Image: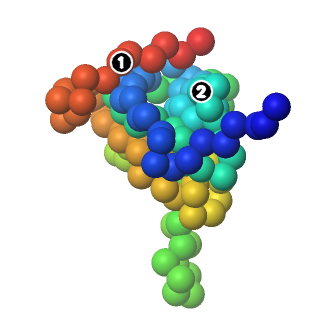
Amino acid sequence: MNTFMQKKEGVLRKWYVIDAKGLPLGRVATKAATVLRGKHKATYTPSVDCGDYVIIINASQVVLTGNKLEDKKYYNHSGFPGGLRERNAKLMRAEYPEEMMERAVKGMLPHNKLGRAMGKKLFVYRDENHKHDAQKPVELKVD
């Protein structure tokens, strides 16, 4: 018996939408990363981008437990001396919820060319309005 290996030409992709309203950031991110990688499919192959498209709505209403709103820091560096910028999770959720969600999900994907290709199938929106109605996304429940 041979092991089945998915080919990139034979991948069938679906669209899923996740409503992050009132859900913990990590739970939403792990579910999205699993679907983006394709690990929810029986035809999962580690070396092929066999994942589906994911739309996350209501990113500004995601929940962070404990003291993470005050204690969790997000860092950026411009590459110039003194170019370090530090923001806490409260500011990120208020002003940049899309970036906060993308960072959480993309941090759970492989850090190589394949992971970057998977990350391009992620779409995050601040509120419930998104522009992917034509794709007929299926709602995905987060446990």
- Calculate the distance from the C-alpha at mark 1 to the C-alpha at mark 2: 16 Å
Task: Find the residue positioned furthest to the front.
Answer: 1
> What percent of the width, then of the height, locates residue 11?
47, 40
- Left or right? Give the position of 27 relative to 53: right
Q: Which residue is mark 1?
A: 138
Q: Secondary structure at mark 1?
A: strand
- Residue at position x 64%, y 25% from top? 42
- Disc 1 residue type (three-letter): Val
Closer to the observer: label 1 or label 2?
A: 2
Task: Find the residue positioned furthest to the bottom.
Answer: 81
86 to 66, vertically: above or below:
below
Please say whether residue 77 is visible from this viewpoint: yes
> What percent of the width, then of the height, locates residue 3?
76, 37
Residue 111 - label: none
> What percent of the width, then of the height, locates residue 40?
61, 26
2 to 22, vertically: above or below:
below
Q: Which residue is mark 2?
A: 41
- Residue at position x 82%, y 31% from top? 1
- Disc 2 residue type (three-letter): Lys
